[in-house]
Amino acid sequence: MNNPQTLEGGCTCGQVRYRLLAKPLFTHCCHCRWCQRESGSAFALNAMIEADRVELLQGQPEVVATPSNSGKGQKFSRFPVCRIAVWSNYAGAGDKVHFVRVGTLDDPDQVPPDMHIFTASKQRWVVLPADTPAVSGYYDRKRYWPAESLERRERMLAS
């Protein structure tokens, strides 16, 4: 990612705008069936970042609680008019980490996936790049995340 201070995004109708104030902790492309259903596509591309490093520039998303595959639920932040999900929060880190939908960034090419997960259920026609790690299920964060991201995560969880 070039300059994270310039990464902005928003919903389709433009009423919700946000800015990432730091590089995401990690970006994964999830190929689980649950993400396929929720996205209506072959996968979900999520950039994980501390919630306090996402600046809301305009509008106010509506938080919608939905079930999740883990059974612990998740919260989608959507704009009430166009219904686009700009980020979600999962039970694990709660409200401290936003899973920003990379496709809602103005320049999503700046945030490619660091890893592909749950590839055991990926669509057969999806071809994964050989130079990006991929695992059949979930992954060991300590093995794949950069040291800086692990440190940021620890500081965030301790606060």
Image (tube, helix red, strand yellow):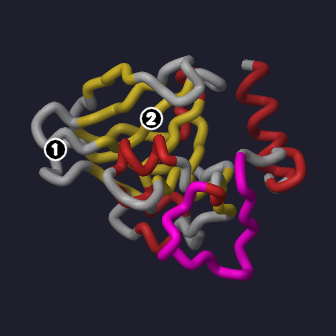
Q: Callout 1: helix, strand or loop?
A: loop
Foreground pick, 88 / 126? 126
Q: Is residue 127 above or below residue 100?
A: below
Of labels 2 and 1, the one closer to you:
2
Q: Which residues are magenta?
A: 121-137
Q: Amino acid at mark 2?
A: Ser
The image position of residue 74, as x and y in percent, is: 47, 25
- Mark 1 neighbour class, 10 Å CA radius: few under 14, some 14 to 19, many 20 or more: some
* Residue at 83%, 40% in the rendered image: 151
For the C terminus, the image quarter is top right
The image position of residue 35, as x and y in percent, is: 46, 46
The image quadrant that residue 6 belongs to is bottom left
* Residue at 76%, 40% in the rendered image: 152
Q: Amino acid at mark 1?
A: Gln
Q: Horizontally, is 81 left or right of 10 in the view?
A: left
Q: Is residue 70 something one can see in this rendering? A: yes
The image position of residue 89, as x and y in percent, is: 50, 30
Number of the label disc, if any, that sits on residue 15: 1
Number of the label disc, if any, that sits on residue 84: none
Magenta-drawn stretch contains 126: yes
User: Which residue carries the number 2 mark?
Assistant: 88
Q: Is residue 92 above or below residue 82?
A: above
